[in-house]
Image (cartoon, rainbow, N blue to C red):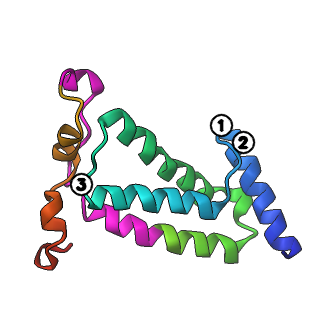
Amino acid sequence: MTETVASYLDEVQRLLQEAGWRQESPATLVSRWDGFVRSCEDGYTWDVSEYTNEVAVRSVLERLLTAPSLAPYPEQAGGLRDEVRKIDDRFRCLLQEGSELPKPRTLVGTRSAEACRRAVCRLPPSSLRDPSRAC
């Protein structure tokens, strides 16, 4: 590992700690984001609280992508940005324009994956497998 990569990773760890996250590598965060998006593509089966918990990894990635302290590492930051952008594009295809997740109290008794999916996703899981319905 080069000194530049080591310095980049040290700064990432500092930013993660500052944000209250445990030590993780950028690759692990990207993998978590990708896994979450894959589960949405397959028809998210967990409830709204799980959804909001899992989608939080994207906010951490955004913090890394916009951190001024990581600007001296354009090669590493650019690679991270490219990977995240590809996953974001897939996720964006699943969202309904102008919709938001309902507040948890409005889902009392219906905090199901189906309520979450109806609130956010514009296509049912089966249509995601139909190439003619692609984004």
In three-dimensional space, the C-alpha distance between marks 3 and 2, rounded to whole angstroms, equals 32 Å
Residue at 12% of width from left, 66% of height from top? Answer: 127
Residue furthest out toward the right: 3
Q: Earlier in the sequence, mark 3 or mark 2?
A: 2
Neighbourhood count class around disc 1 (C-alpha, 10 Å): few under 14, some 14–19, many 20 upward = few
In the picture of the structure, the residue carrying the numbered disc 3 is: 43
Mark 3 or mark 1: whose residue is earlier in sequence: 1
Distance between the alpha carbons at the discs numbered 3 and 1: 30 Å
Label 2, label 1: how many angstroms apart (C-alpha)? 5 Å
Q: Residue at x 31, y 41 (%)?
A: 46
Q: State left or right for residue 23 relative to residue 89.
A: right
Q: Mark 1 belongs to which amino acid?
A: Gly
The correct choice, above or below, for 91 with respect to 23 in the image is below
Asked whether 104 or 69 is in front, the reply is: 104
- Where in the figure is residue 77, as x and y percent of width and height? 64, 69
Tag 2 near tag 1, CB within 8 Å: yes
The residue nearer to you, when weighing 8 against 110, is 110
Residue 17 — which label? 2
Tell me which segment is drawn in magenta: 85-109
Comparing labels 3 and 1, the label whose residue is closer to the camera: 3
Amino acid type for the residue under numbered disc 2: Gln
Q: Quadrant of the N terminus?
A: bottom right
133 up-or-down from 70: above or below = below
In magenta stretch: residue 100: yes
Residue 90 sits inside the magenta stretch: yes
Q: Which residue is mark 1?
A: 20
Label 3: element kind: loop
Q: Specify few, some or many for label 2: CA neighbours under 10 Å numbering under 14, 14-19, or 20 or more.
A: few
Q: Residue at x 21, y 26 (%)?
A: 107
The disc labelled 3 sits on which kind of residue?
Answer: Gly
What SS does tag 1 mark? Answer: loop
Side of 27 where 89 appears, left or right:
left
